[in-house]
Image (cartoon, rainbow, N blue to C red):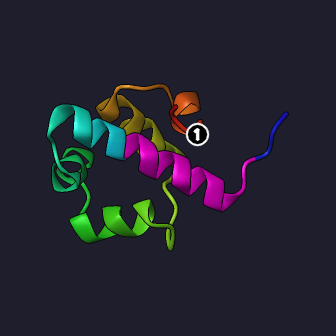
Amino acid sequence: MNTLTKTAMTTAIKERVALYVARTKNDRQTIAEQMGMPVSTFYSKLNGPSEFSFTEGKRLAEIIGCTVDEMFIRPN
């Protein structure tokens, strides 16, 4: 089983969000609002100083249209 580092997980999540933003024309602020968190908190979690909880990760996956597992795999 591959173990992802915190940096690798953050990078994968950030890339998934960027792909979603490009595909849907929604922005990160909209995603933060859909998650029910302040934009500053979302940016902090997206950029690494903080981490998404499992519940937040699950909600983010639902919003961007992937599974929790897919969110941790860098898109092609």
**At 30% from the left edge and 34% from the top edge, which residue is drawn?**
63
Residue 44 vs residue 73, the one in the foreground: 73
Query: Quadrant of the rendered structure where residue 65 is?
Result: top left
Residue 26 vs residue 61, the one in the foreground: 26
Return the residue found at the far front: 76
| Percent x, y of residue 52 | 48, 55
Is 15 contained in the magenta span? yes
Is 34 contained in the magenta span? no
| Percent x, y of residue 29 | 18, 56
Residue 55 appears left or right of 2: left
Residue 41 vs residue 10, the one in the foreground: 10
As drawn, 64 above or below 43: above
**At 44% from the left edge and 66% from the top edge, which residue is drawn?**
47
**At 32% from the left edge and 33% from the top edge, which residue is drawn?**
64
| Percent x, y of residue 61 | 41, 34
**At 30% from the left edge and 36% from the top edge, which residue is drawn?**
20
Q: Give the overall secondary structure of the magenta segment.
A: helix
Residue 65 appears left or right of 32: right
Residue 62 appears left or right of 23: right
As drawn, 48 above or below 26: below
| Percent x, y of residue 62 | 35, 29
- Label 1: how many Cα within 10 Å (few below 14, some 14–19, many 20+): some
The amino acid type of the residue labelled 1 equals Phe
Residue 67 appears left or right of 2: left
Point out the image quarter for the N terminus. Answer: top right
In the image, the segment drawn in magenta is 4-17
Disc 1: which residue: 72
